[in-house]
Image: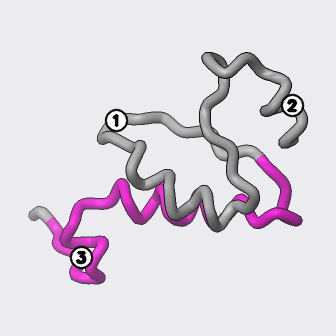
């Protein structure tokens, strides 16, 4: 995939990451409430780690810290 990324004109390139773990650390800084994200990849490169981080980041802060609150 790196070759495909590098073949794009610079103004069309986003960011490229060597590993899913590297992307998982970076993706949290690009998300806003209401964003819709498609995570596509293979189990071989552990893209599920990215989905886990997205789910965690998009939770309310109280839930992220392990202190789930319920509205009644």
Q: Which residues are magenta?
A: 41-70
Q: Most extreme residue toward the bottom, as rendered?
A: 66
Reading the image, the residue beneath label 2 is 4
First in sequence: mark 1 or mark 3? 1
First in sequence: mark 3 or mark 2? 2
**Placement of 52 over or under 40, stated as above or below:** below
User: What's the distance in space between the residues labelled 3 and 2, CA to CA?
Assistant: 42 Å
Classed neighbour count for the residue bearing mark 3: other residues with Cα under 10 Å, few (<14), some (14–19), many (≥20): few
Location of residue 23 (image quadrant): bottom right
Describe the element under mark 3 as helix, strand or loop. loop
Describe the element under mark 2 as helix, strand or loop. helix
Q: Residue at x 26, y 79 (%)?
A: 65
User: What's the distance in space between the residues labelled 1 and 3, CA to CA?
Assistant: 20 Å
Q: Position of residue 53 (x, y in %)?
A: 50, 63
Reading the image, the residue beneath label 3 is 68
Looking at the image, residue 26 sits to the left or right of residue 72; the answer is right
Q: Position of residue 58 (x, y in %)?
A: 36, 54
Q: Residue at x 73, y 17 (%)?
A: 9
**Placement of 71 over or under 39, stated as above or below:** below
Q: Nearer the viewer, mark 2 or mark 1?
A: 2
Q: Nearer the viewer, mark 1 or mark 3?
A: 1
**Placement of 5 over or under 26, stated as above or below:** above
Reading the image, the residue beneath label 1 is 34
Location of residue 1 (image quadrant): top right
The answer to which of 10 and 2 lies nearer the viewer is: 10
């Amino acid at each position: 995939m790196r070759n495909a990324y590098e073949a794009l004109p610079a103004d069309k390139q986003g960011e490229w990451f060597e590993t899913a773990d590297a992307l998982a650390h970076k993706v949290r800084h690009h998300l806003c409430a209401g964003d819709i994200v498609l995570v596509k990849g293979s189990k071989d490169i552990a893209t599920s780690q990215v989905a886990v981080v997205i789910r965690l980041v998009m939770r309310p802060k109280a839930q992220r810290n392990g202190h789930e609150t319920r509205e009644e």
